[in-house]
Amino acid sequence: MNVNPGDNRFCVVTNNDIGAPIVVPPVPPLIDVVKVPSPLALPNGPGSVMYTYTLKNIGTVPVTNVTMVGDTCSPIVRISGDVNNDNKLDLTETWAHTCTTTLTSTHTNNVVATGWANGLSATDIASATVIVGVPAVVPPLIHVTKVPNPLALAAGGGIVTYTEKITNPGTIPLSNVQLVDDKCAPMQFISGDINGNNLLEPTETWAYTCQSNLKTTTTNTAIASGQANGITVRDFAIATVVVAEAAPILPVTGFFSAEKTPWVFAILSSVFAAAVLLYTIRNKKNI
C-alpha cells in the first residue's frame, strides 16, 4: 500500500495465528466400600448383628460430602479414619463405620456410599447376607473394585484401561467366580489364583483388565459373582471416565458479515465515511 502525505487509509488486520483453546476435563472421584457382618450366621435364631463398613478413596482427588446410607440399618456411624479431621476422604485414609441391628430372619442388607469432587459424584454399593435359624450354613461374601486409567481424557477421547480386582472378605472359598462389565469386554484374567484350584480364597486377590476406546464421558458398572454353600453373592463397582467437550469455535476475524454482525459493519462504515470526509476536506484546503 502506498500512502501519500495527508492521506488517510483504513485497514483491517486479521490475526490468524490464535490456537484453539484447550478444554481441561475435571477429574472424577472414585470410592470403594466393603461391608462385613459379624456374625455372618445366627444358627440359633434371632440375634444382634454388627456391620462394619470400610470406605477408601481409590481415585486421585480428595472426596467431600461423603454419605453412607443403609437400607435396613441405621444410624451408620463413622468411628475412625479422618486423620486430619477435615471431613475429606483423602487418598491415604481409610474410614471405618459401624451399624448394629437385630435380625429375626435371614436378611440381605445394602449400603450406598457417595462422595463428591470437582462437581462430580462417585458411588459404590455393598451388600451382605446374614443367615438366621439355619445350622451349619455360613454365607459367602465377595468384593470387586474397578480403577480406570486415565480417569479423564481430552476432547476426542482415547483408550482407557480398566483394572478390576475381586477379593473374598468372607470366611469360605468361592467357586464359579465371574466378572462382567456392561461397557467393556472381554475381561482378561491376569493373576491371583495362587494355588490354581479355581476357588477364590479369602487370602487371594484376582486381577483382571479390559480396554475400551471412549469418545464421550462414560460410566460403567462391573458385576462380580461367586457361589458357596448353595448361595450366590454379587458385588458392584462403578466408575466414570470424563471426556472433555470439544473446544468452542473461534470467532471469525478479518472482514465482518453485515448479516451476522450488523453493528460491527455499521461502526466500520461510519469510520470509513469519516475518513473519506476528512480526506475530502484536506484536499479542498490544498486547492
Image: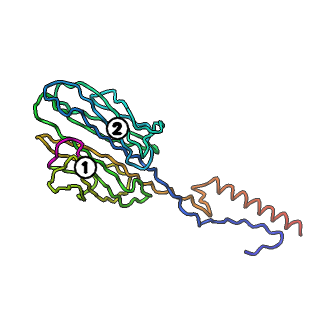
- Which-is-in-front pick, marks 1 and 2? 1
Q: State left or right for residue 241 relative to residue 273.
A: left
Rendered-image quadrant of the C terminus: bottom right
Residue 242 coordinates in the image, percent (x, y): 40, 52
Q: Which residue is drawn at 19% across and 41% down?
A: 171
Q: Does the magenta stretch include residue 173?
A: yes
Q: Residue at x 48, y 39 (%)?
A: 84
Dot 1 or dot 2: first in sequence order is 2
Q: What residue type is labelled 2?
A: Ala
Q: Which residue lies furthest to the bottom in this view?
A: 2
Asked which quadrant contains residue 51, the reply is: top left
Q: Name the residue under label 2.
A: 113
Q: State left or right for residue 198 relative to residue 155.
A: left
Cα distance, mark 1 to mark 2? 19 Å
Secondary structure at numbered mark 2: strand
Q: Residue at x 31, y 58 (%)?
A: 212
Foreground residue among 14 and 214: 214
Q: How many marks?
A: 2
Q: State left or right for residue 271 relative to residue 258.
A: right
Foreground residue among 105 and 19: 105
Q: Which residue is drawn at 66% across and 66% down?
A: 13
Provide the major secondary structure of the magenta segment.
Answer: loop
Model colouring: rainbow
**Circle on res. 166:** 1
> What residue range appears in magenta?
168-175
Crowding around mark 2 (Cα neighbors within 10 Å: few <14, some 14 to 19, many 20+) is many
Residue 69 coordinates in the image, percent (x, y): 33, 32
Residue 239 against residue 185 in the figure, above or below: above
Q: Is residue 239 magenta?
A: no
Rendered-image quadrant of the N terminus: bottom right
Residue 177 coordinates in the image, percent (x, y): 18, 50
Foreground residue among 17 and 117: 117
